[in-house]
Image: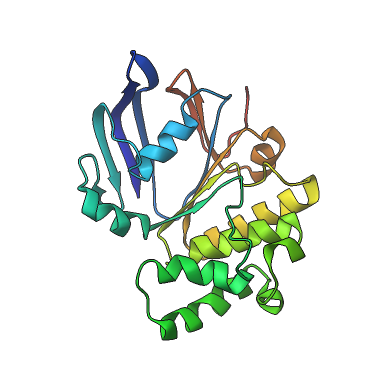
Amino acid sequence: MLKFKNVSKIYPGQSVALKNVNLHIRPGEFVSIVGQSGTGKTTLIKLILAEERPSKGSITVGGWDITDIKYKEIPTLRRQIGVIFQDFKLLPRKTLFENVAFALEVSGESYAKIKDIVPQVLKIVGLEKKQDRYPNQVSGGEQQRVVVARSLAHRPKVLVADEPTGNLDSINSREIIELLKKINDFGTTVVLVTHNREIVNDLRKRVITLEDGMVISDRQRGKYLL
């Protein structure tokens, strides 16, 4: 599903964000990528989304070598990758239904398809009865659920969750993680990027640890040791 082969990313001024990273995330896996701030987690995500290009090495997503991906091909790539960010990035003047629908509208989906898909993904996250509410009318945990629903709208092969519980309390954090596990049970590959030790250790899934831009540990049913 995701392969990094000898990937390095060096920014101007010789700032090394990633150094000789090798990893292989298989279809259907649930993997946590952990590390302190500045270890390269954000750069890793940007490379997966083709927001950045590697300075060296190759990157494959779902059998597609995106190392030198053309600009016009990037939207096609991103329809295969759902992304959940720490800050919700919801449109305040649109309802929950409209927020999810917007992700489909910008990619040119028909109204009939939007009308069919949006209720389905809102039901997965338990918000089908609140689809006409606005973001400020629901809790922070529910707003993050809308983000999850939006990330599922294109039925992605892989879901990248970048600190999805960073703005949530412990109860809502656990609910979001349980939702990610449910999505993974459906067969979607989940990549969780986090610094939350408790969440990672409770998951007891594969853990990849970054330090100074390098993979220093890759453990099945691992723990966050740093």
**Looking at the image, is 83 positioned above or below residue 45?**
below
Horizontal relation, residue 126 to residue 111: left or right: right
User: Percent position (x, y) of residue 62?
Assistant: 31, 53
- Extreme residue toward the bottom, this view: 112
- Extreme residue toward the front, this view: 93
Judge by depth and name the residue closer to the eye, 147 or 178: 147
**Looking at the image, is 199 positioned above or below residue 218?**
below
Horizontal relation, residue 67 to residue 139: left or right: left
Residue drawn at (33%, 36%), measured in percent from left and top? 52
- Extreme residue toward the top, this view: 14
Judge by depth and name the residue closer to the eye, 79 or 211: 79
Residue drawn at (24%, 54%), measured in percent from left and top? 73
User: Percent position (x, y) of residue 123?
Assistant: 62, 75
Q: How is the image coloured?
A: rainbow
Marker count (numbered) = 0
Residue 185 visible in image: no
Judge by depth and name the residue closer to the eye, 166 or 216: 166
Q: Quadrant of residue 100?
A: bottom right
User: Percent position (x, y) of residue 111?
Assistant: 43, 83
Residue drawn at (47%, 34%), measured in percent from left and top? 42
User: Percent position (x, y) of residue 188?
Assistant: 47, 59
Residue drawn at (55%, 62%), measured in percent from left and top? 183
Horizontal relation, residue 143 to residue 154: left or right: right
Residue 27 visible in image: yes
**Looking at the image, is 204 positioned above or below residue 171?**
above
Quarter of the picture holding the C terminus: top right
